[in-house]
Amino acid sequence: MKVKQGQHVLICGGGSGLGLGVATRLLQRGVTLSVLDLRLSDATRAELDAAVAKGGSCAFYEADVTHGAKLKHAVNAAVNVSGHPDLAFNSAGIIANKSFEDTDEATFRKVIDVNLHGSFNFAQAAVPHLKAGSRLALVASIAGLTSNYGYTAYGVSKFGVVGLATTLRYEYAPLGIDISVICPPEV
């Protein structure tokens, strides 16, 4: 799916990292962008504003992927303002680079909660607004295909995201909604 000028894109986790990089590139293509994240720094706002000056429009919605109801509220608010999304993109995620022996239960739960439950929560919030021809994209990692030393929680969470996207693909392909899972190497 090539995103075009005037289309609405939701990016969850668009305040930093991969999500911010995708957001600025899409704004330069002239999209209507809804950025969902915990917060936006002044530097991030300036970067998004600079990209807006080249084309699209951008609105920020405070959202936390670990709180399903609040995330649904933010997605609904974005849809009410900008319409149904042509692309719903989740790149919200965290990493804990620790061996199994060094990973405590709280760290493991937090990584699973943000990366896997967050992907589930975003899909639950976004999919009801998708129409035939639109796409849900979930960012996993190459670690979701082949994990590595020190990725106890991260690798498990990203394997789960790959599995979630695969299942959603079976369920939503008959409705004309495309599901993608993106597995980049280290970013």
Image (cartoon, rainbow, N blue to C red):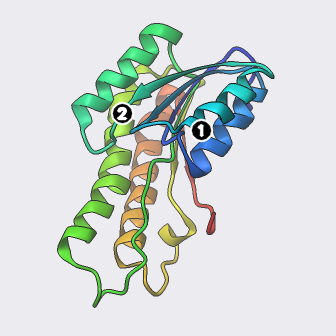
Q: Is residue 98 above or below residue 179?
A: below
| Residue at x 74%, y 32% (from the top left corner) | 2
Farthest residue toward the front? 42
- Graded by Cα atoms within 10 Å as few (under 14), some (14 to 19) or many (20 or more), the crowding at tag 1 reads some
Farthest residue toward the right? 54
- Residue occupied by mark 2: 63
What secondary structure is found at the residue carrying circle 2? loop
84 to the left or right of 77: right
Farthest residue toward the left? 105
Determine which of the numbered discs, if any, sits on residue 109 in the image: none
Q: CA distance from mark 1 to mark 2?
A: 16 Å
Which x, y percent locates residue 28?
Answer: 78, 28
- Residue 3 appearing in the image: no
Location of residue 86 by image quarter? top right
Which x, y percent locates residue 171?
Answer: 40, 39
Which x, y percent locates residue 54?
Answer: 81, 22
- Residue 35 appearing in the image: yes
What secondary structure is found at the residue carrying circle 1? helix
| Residue at x 50%, y 19% (from the top left corner) | 131
Determine which of the numbered discs, if any, sits on residue 44 in the image: 1
- Graded by Cα atoms within 10 Å as few (under 14), some (14 to 19) or many (20 or more), the crowding at tag 2 reads many
Location of residue 186 by image quarter? bottom right
Taking depth in this image into account, of 160 and 53 the one nearest to the observer is: 53
1 or 2: mark nearer the eye: 1
| Residue at x 55%, y 47% (from the top left corner) | 16
